[in-house]
Amino acid sequence: MPIHSPWRADFPGILALEAEGQIYLDNAATAQKPQIMLDALLGYYASGAANVHRAQHLPGERATRAFEATRVKVAQWLNAETSEQIVLTRGATEAFNLLAYGLEDRFQPGDEVAISALEHHANLLPWQQLALRRGLELVVLPLDAAGTIDLQQAAQLIGPRTKLLAVSQLSNVLGRWQPLEQLLRLAAAQGAITVVDGAQGVVHGRHDMQALACDFYICSSHKLYGPDGVGVLYSRAEALRQLRHWQFGGEMVAQADYRSAQFRPAPLGFEAGTPPVSGVIALGASLDYLGSLDGAAVTEHEAALHAKLLAGLAARDGVRLVGTPEVALASFVVDGVHNADLAHLLTEQGIAVRAGHHCAMPLMQRLGLAGAIRVSLGLYNDESDLQRLFAGLDKALELLR
Ligand code: PMP
């Protein structure tokens, strides 16, 4: 029996692409949206848009209530203690930059910031630039052959000079869960601030912030079947108090005169200016949708599809996986074939996969690769998509070899 997704019909974008002859296998870059989210997005505008947190009038009050309801839903999704621990940013990338500026005072020249070799540019460049501004040392934790941060080496490299550890929960290239618990323990033993990049991890399964015990956890709405333009920064309550304000403007201020100002505490103190009101409200609808699904069934569906994806790739001559992915995606190269040529021929056949460095150039350099093709799955993908992928791959490779 071929694997079907019972949720496919909930995603008009997938159906529209299908009607156009396209299959979508680039879910780690961004996911398609459920109808309920589109309804919420349109509903906000169609029933009267208004700014949040400032107006007394009915539409303003309604928008504020819906906006704040999403904050509560995000807090529940992540099992934060309170919704005050959730800062809504304009994307995951903005949240990393918020931290790199907001924590800047915490560092002295010579302090170390530890990241891993597999980080996305979003969890590398803000720290690299902070290190350059403050004279810090960026320490890069190496990987083992499977694509997991090497714990033995991490234990050597995380030491008394480590002031911050920032690592990914699930690699967007290698598809491997990282040993967060052990890494966070190593960092906590040194009193270091801990940051987890949950941009990929949050999409697969539920993650409990109180159990994880990191200081900060960052993710994006658009990969979680929500709208783009919204990011989430979860902070442990004490960690939140260490943050300095970083963007200045309307709504984040408690009191201002021409010469000085006092700022609001989190979360609003870190949400300067008009936030992405419609997007935040629509993210709430996506979480409602995801919350209504049987999470175990989704995980099982994705795992079954992932096994077929890996088997299909393994069955093809010259196809080499990059790392040993555990979930949802597979990056690969083909001996003697340039990834851009292959991607081009797949695109021509209506197969949407990602090619290139996947915003992790240093990782690619370390792996000695010019780039790779990445196939990443969403909950609406099914076996027919994989059949199209493999047929397209065979045809492209026949032309290229
Ligand atoms: N970290 C990882 C692991 C990612 O995959 C991404 C998105 N490609 C990001 C961070 C950045 O997310 P965004 O582009 O939504 O800001």
Image (spheres, rainbow, N blue to C red):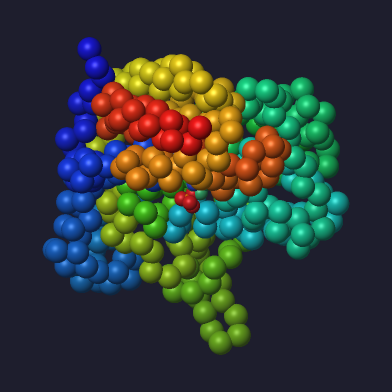
Query: Looking at the image, which is closer to me, 131 or 301?
Result: 301
Of residue 137 and residue 247, the one placed in the foreground of this image is: 137
Residue for point 39% across, 57% down: 229
**Relative side of 303 to 170, left or right:** left
Which residue sits furthest bottom?
A: 258
Is the N terminus in the top left, top right, bottom left or bottom right quadrant? top left
Q: Position of residue 315 (x, y in %)?
A: 46, 16
Q: Residue at x 49, y 74 (%)?
A: 249
Q: Is residue 325 above or below residue 80?
A: above
Rendered image quadrant of residue 19: top left
Q: Would residue 113 be seen by someone viewing this image from the given angle? A: yes
User: Which is nearer the eye, 58 or 330?
Assistant: 330
Look at the picture and state if 321 lies above or below 194. Answer: above
Taking the spot 80% from the left edge, 53% from the top edge, the residue there is: 136
**Observer able to see residue 393:** no
Residue positioned 17% across, 51% down in the render = 39
64 displayed left or right of 186: left
Report the residue that reaches farthest toward the right: 110
* Residue 355 location (% of width, % of height): 49, 43
Measured as percent of width and height from the top left, residue 215 is found at: 60, 41
Where 292 falls versus 243 (above or below)?
Answer: above
Expressed as whole percent of the image width and height from the top left, the position of residue 234 reads 50, 45
Query: On the image, which quarter does residue 81 sit in?
Result: top left
The furthest residue to the left:
47
Q: Is residue 308 above or below residue 18?
A: above
